[in-house]
Image: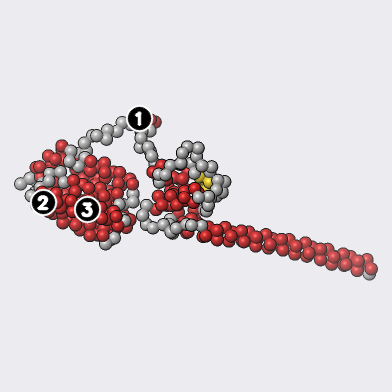
Amino acid sequence: MAKRHKCRDKVCYDRFTISIQWSGHWAFCSMHLKLQQASFFAKTRAYFLMPFQVIDNQRLYRQIADQLRALIDSGEFPPGSRLPAERELAKLLGVSRASVREAMIALEVIGLVDVRVGNGVLVCEPPVQTVSDEPVMAQATRDQWKELDPELNLEIDFSAEIPPFALLQARRLIEPEAAALAAVNASDEELAGIREAFERNVQDNREGSHTHPGDRLFHIRIAQASDNPAYALMIQHLLGHRYGSMFQRLQNHYTPQDMTHRSEDEHRRVLQALEQHDAGAARQAMSEHLDEVIRIFSRSAR
């Protein structure tokens, strides 16, 4: 009996020991979890206390990059520290993760951070070269079109004239979407610039201009206000060919006398849609305008 009791006592003791060990383990795990939670909330609180500003709808990636650079320069994120995760930054700034990612890449290009996919974004030591006051995106994209990729063995003649209908077809594909984006993204200053170009176009018509700079400027400024630099670049290049020798001949032979005033009315509808921030109406008005231009130049001569 004694032996049996002793064994039972040992079992009880062992169970007690195991219970104490498990209790201690769980207490440790619980404390560790609480410390992790406290650290997480402290970091999150620190992020919210940092001078982040909610980004407005203009040039999102540019603003994010400039704001993060300012925080890095001020010491809020010293060398060796990590920037908040994409998801956290997107939430803090009220933007998409894609916009945050573009900004991070731009900061890496100018040497301020090291993007480690899956392991965060590390702030680097400041570059040795003199720090520029230029916006981040201006530094990151400088000279990106300076030379062609030698591996492709291409030759591009940017001075070559584009045939008129090829030019109009390209514009028909690009400009309605650029107008829709401009209706959403254009700032008050950009809208004022578009209206100024429209009024110049009206004045050109009254004075019988043959080059219509206001017309071209109207379309260029809409593309610039789209917040898509690729659209702006393409439209500026295409409209640089607007009045090449082939287009001038096409205009001289096939432009009806009332075309300038029709175009003026169509431009006005585009402008109204932009000022009302109606993307659908802006897209439709621009599409109808360019369809009409193509129709007029394609019709049979009288």
Farthest-out residue, right: 2
Q: Mark 2 belongs to which amino acid?
A: Arg
**Residue 266 on image: x %, y %:** 18, 55
Question: Crowding near pointer 3: few (<14 within 10 Å), some, many (20+)?
Answer: some
- For the point 44% across and 49% down, which residue is it? 65
- Left or right? Give the position of 154 relative to 271: right
Q: Which residue is mark 3?
A: 196
Q: Do the residues bearing badges 1 and 3 touch, measured as CB atoms within 8 Å?
A: no
Q: Do the residues bearing badges 3 and 2 touch, measured as CB atoms within 8 Å?
A: no
Compute the Cα span from label 2 to label 1: 49 Å
- Label 2: which secondary element: helix
Is residue 166 visible in this depiction of the protein? no
Q: Which residue is mark 2?
A: 206
Question: Crowding near pointer 2: few (<14 within 10 Å), some, many (20+)?
Answer: few
Q: Which residue is mark 1?
A: 153
- For the point 31% across and 56% down, which residue is it? 187
Q: Nearer the viewer, mark 2 or mark 1?
A: 2
- Label 3: which secondary element: helix
Q: Mark 3 belongs to which amino acid?
A: Glu
Is residue 36 visible in this depiction of the protein? yes
Q: Mark 1 belongs to which amino acid?
A: Asn
Question: Crowding near pointer 1: few (<14 within 10 Å), some, many (20+)?
Answer: few
Q: Do the residues bearing badges 2 and 1 touch, measured as CB atoms within 8 Å?
A: no
